[in-house]
Image (cartoon, grey):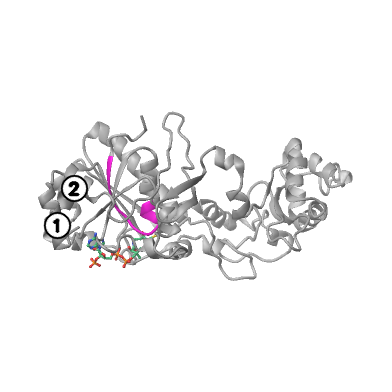
Amino acid sequence: MKALDGIKILDFTHVQSGPTCTQLLGWFGADVIKVERPGVGDATRKQLIDKPGSDSLYFTMLNHNKRSLTLNTKTDDGKEVLERLIKECDVMVENFAPGALDRMGFTWERIQELNPKMIMASVKGFGPGPYEDCKVYENVAQCAGGAASTTGFRDGPPLVTGAQIGDSGTGLHLCLGIVTALFQRERSGRGQKVLAPMQDSVLNLCRVKLRDQQRLDAGPLKEYSQFGEGVAFGEATPRAGNDSGGGQPGRILKCLGWENDPDAYTYFITQAAVWKNICDVIGKPEWKDDPDYATPDVRLNKLNEIFDTIEAWTMTKDKFDVMDICNPLNIPVGPILSMKELAEEPALRDTGTIVEVDHPERGKYLTVGCPVKLSDSEVDVTRSPLLGEHSEEVLAMLGYSETDISAMRESGAI
Ligand code: COA
């Protein structure tokens, strides 16, 4: 048995944020029915095409463990099918532009009328307020949620990050909201609305930067390199490059081969508890008891000198050797791993985090499997559905006869 066995999801999501959420629900065992426009489908099916004629990796990697039903929900037949689906399903998930569902005739009031137990979950760019009607994509959310202003180097422009914190990050938040609402429904018997705005989700992930915003009132942020460099702080949390900015200073440092390999780097954390081990490893035993270096506070205005010295050592070592030498001494370090290295990492294959999937149109491809491991609910990653692959079986489940289904096909409703 799987954790969400028996739970039916009406998946009205598209692009990335909503689909990451419903994919997780599918991995946890829910029956996910993805509703797509006939002949078109989710826009990502045909975006970033690498193999002509086949669904893109963008689509396949976000839509595993789902069934696809094509439905034109702007036709009368389509609306009727959607009504039956709403009555049949436990959760409806959508991430249309604000107002799209209302324009389709499916307001929250109407949905509750059809199924008072329905959990209606939405991703929107912004929550209620001046921007609630705006369409939003990943990088807009990263900018509006505080990630971009705090990412990058002080002397450069704001930067977006490759981690899709706006889309996939919000999908995770929404998924948590849904399972929590399902849990509450067990006791209340009622459904509810769940909203995960992308701005709010990104801000949640940038929580420590709002912490620093308030700490600025008490003086300079001493854990940021700019403090040691004597650069004044402005009014807002600054970009901190690769500083950890937290209680344990850290940096990205060059390793052997950095001149030719863009990923020959390590992250190195000067954790206070193991300072003496660090001094021994980098050949600076005299720093162990030197009052100018021995305690975390006195080191804060010397971070550049300290990390330059550590880097002179890491540059003599391969990034994996740094790991092998530092780990037994409890010094927290981590190699910068490329996507190529991650794709080839056997341990991630063994745990099902990197999975090879076979697809009838594109053959074998790699995907990221379920990153959350439940000991009593195993995940089998199954390929994404072709457009409308399950239309007949889903309509039959809803009580439609073969004649009804042919008529809907004729009229273009499915
Ligand atoms: N049958 C008939 N019509 C359908 C349909 C179906 N099965 N599925 C969708 N549509 C219609 C919608 O009703 C809408 O029509 P309307 O504008 O006439 O009311 C239309 O398709 C387009 O929907 P929309 O969501 O506006 O798509 P878009 O491509 O213009 O915008 C986003 C895309 C992502 C910007 C927008 O959906 C959005 O802001 N979503 C919320 C935030 C979000 O999730 N962003 C991240 C995406 S990864």
Between 97 and 379, which is closer to the camera in this rendering? Answer: 379
Please indicate whether residue 136 sits to the left or right of residue 282 in the image.
left
Q: What is the crowding at mark 1: few (fewer than 14 residues within 10 Å), some, or many (at least 20)?
A: some
Query: Residue at point 46% right, 60% down?
Result: 145
**Which quadrant is home to the C terminus?**
bottom left
Query: Residue at point 36% right, 33% down?
Result: 3
Query: What amino acid is labelled 1 in the image?
Result: Met
Q: Residue furthest right?
A: 286
Query: What amino acid is labelled 2 in the image?
Result: Leu
Between 287 and 329, which is closer to the camera in this rendering? Answer: 329
Q: Any magenta on residue 14?
A: yes
Q: Which mark is residue 408?
A: 1
What is the x, y in percent for residue 76?
11, 59
What is the x, y in percent for residue 58?
44, 58
Query: Residue at point 73% right, 59% down?
Result: 228
Q: Are marks 1 and 2 in contact (CB under 8 Å)?
A: yes
Q: Which residue is mark 2?
A: 395
In magenta, the rendered stretch is 8-19
What is the x, y in percent for residue 10?
26, 48
Please tell me whether residue 3 is drawn above or below residue 90 in the rendered image: above
Q: CA distance from mark 1 to mark 2?
A: 10 Å
Quadrant field for ligand 1:
bottom left
Q: Which comes before the other along the chain, label 1 or label 2?
A: 2
Please tell me whether residue 129 is drawn above or below residue 386 in the rendered image: below
